[in-house]
Amino acid sequence: MMARIESPAPAIKVKSWLRGQPLTSFQPGKVYIVGFWSSWCGPTFATISQLVQLQEKYRDKGLEVIGVAACEEVQTPDEARINLDAWLTKKVPNLNYRFAYDSTGDMSQLWMEPGLFCGMPTSFIIDRHGYIAFIGSPMQLDDVLPKVIDGIWCARDDAKAADTECSRDKPIVVDLDGSLLLTDVLYESFFNVLPLGFSTNFATVRALANGKAAVKHHLALSSELDYATLPYNACVLDLIQAAKAQGRKVYLATAADAKHAKAIADHLGIFDDWFASDERTNLTGSLKAEILTSAFGKCGFDYIGHGSSDLPVWEVADKAYGVGLSKSVKNRLVTLKGEYVALDAGNADRQVWFKALRVHQYVKNLLIFVPPLTSHQFALVNIITGVVAFIAFCACASAVYILNDLLDLKSDRAHPSKRSRPYASGLLQLRSGLFMVPALLLFSLMLAITLSLEFVDVLFGYFVLTSAYSLYLKRQMIVDVIALAMLYTTRIIAGGIAVQIQISQWLLIFSFFIFTSLALIKRYVELTTRLDRGLPDRSGRDYRSGDLDVVAALVAATGSNAVTIFALYVASADVQTLYRHPRVLWLICPILLYWMARNLMMAHRRLMDDDPIVFALRDHISAIAIVSIVAVVFIAI
């Protein structure tokens, strides 16, 4: 049986029903929507929400909606069923229609493959006589469904249009940056080349004199991208694979340099040929439209694009696919073509931006408040000044975090957890990071100037040191952890300068040792992760798996030194001027010793995150230790 328009609807062969009663056959007199999707494809949630509304709206007119999850990317059917059930419970608690999981592939074989499947999600409408009235994108359901329900939809008139939607004899041409890829290889090349030194970057500047194509060519030749780990758009790849299964030809057409186009085409092995820029020609906009028209004829191909530069190509294409279009491009494309097929680009939400800015790391900047707290100067003006200094450091730190992510794209994608970072995963565009870094630095500088020029100097020193760490120091054994300890200590120095408080030498020495210990634990966790996963030593870091015991010994040594320094402080005369009951502070020593020793034990047992600070925020034992230390200090005061 062929799942085509005007053909009888195939059977429902599903074993796993996650919501609603099982359905084995279509009842005459009812209209059905059978919607296929995969949980990893972005438009899924919008599609499910749309179907919830349609089910509610047309229930009294005999509509029954059936959702089918197909092609889940998991190892076992049981795992998929559990994950889908949890996903539905969290995302769509108001689901009001039957929902099934196609664990055997029967539904895909009966419905999707014969129906010339053109991508996820796809919807089928079955009329009151049990025949397929519509196959296509869910975005068209609002127009088609009322006509099918009222019996005025003429499937025969639309059949040709439906068949030509995925016509076998027309090739699909796919754009690269922002379409097939969730990133842009020009920016990828730029950030790959940036750390290579002055001569390479100066050559890039000189290439500007010969135009954008020459710059692309120079960056492509100078960069070494890992094409296997680049973030590819799963929805676009699925559409390409479906087209190949139908016998259609697929071409890559990109404004990227030919080196990148060839490497990606070779890696994926799904393209019949490719078109790309060279050192003299920038294949974009009208030129790309002209080249493709010469190759395939006007309206002789379907095109997948993502931005305004693709509008001339869409104009000469038969069918338009838009990947993550902006509102303005979407409106222009609709005016140009009347309709298009929307594909997901994994657009970022607020949480992704919070992750990119490392908002959770802002807790480290609370160290700015340590000087006024340890000197017991709690005046309102000090608190306000501290808040301004805190915000300035947060903005500066976020700028450096983003810069670090942009420079570490290649290594992050090879890391088991860091590959999910917003820029490495493609959830955020690299050009947004290129804009955010100077914007955040300017905001930070404006706040710093309101405090004092001395504070500006410290903030600038922090930026220079953290930038040096990102570019070079983090690749140097031991130097990296010393740099991290200095960065933490710099926050304390900045806090004292902001509120004009003389910082105790005891505080600076103690801070340096305890932060060195925490930085070493971070390296220890990274080494254990690579060792447990059987990964090779990182070429960009000067540590080896065999160094694990030495790093653990250094963690213990620096942590013990921090406790020793604190004990000497409690025994000194300086403590007498600040505390009425200074002997109570001795209780902090065993708490500190326990907390730091436990951190090392948790890391050794593989129970700690990459960052010990983040671990401490989540760990209830650490919370108890911190609260206990604060309580002891208040008692001593």
Image (tube, helix red, strand yellow):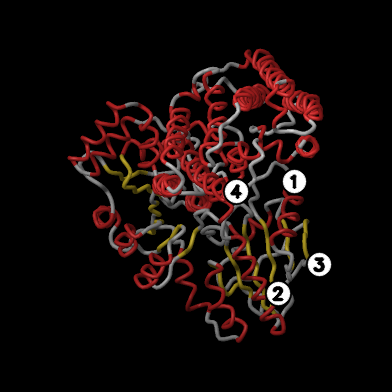
Can the viewer see residue 534?
no
Q: Which residue is mark 3?
A: 21
Q: Position of residue 68 (x, y in %)?
A: 68, 61
Judging from the image, what secondary structure is the residue with disc 3 in?
Answer: loop
Q: Which mark is residue 79?
A: 1
**Callout 4 secondary element:** helix
390 vs 260, nearest the viewer:
390
Say how many tags the image has.
4
Badge 2: few (under 14), some or many (20 or more) residues near its Cα, within 10 Å? many
Amino acid found under the numbered disc labelled 4: Ile
* Residue 129 in which image quadrant: bottom right
Q: Which residue is mark 2?
A: 64
- The N terminus: image quadrant: bottom right
Q: Is residue 282 above or below residue 584?
A: below
Image mark for residue 383: 4
Q: What whole-number distance in Å separates the C-alpha atoms at marks 4 and 3? A: 61 Å
Which amino acid is tagged 3? Gln
Alpha-carbon span between mark 2 and mark 3: 12 Å
Amino acid type of the residue tagged 1 in the rendering: Glu
Residue at horizontal 34%, vertical 62%? Answer: 314
How far is disc 4 from disc 1 in space, using C-alphas? 51 Å
**Which circle's residue, 4 or 1, is located before the other in the chain?**
1
Question: What residue sits 47% from the left and 32% below the top?
Answer: 466
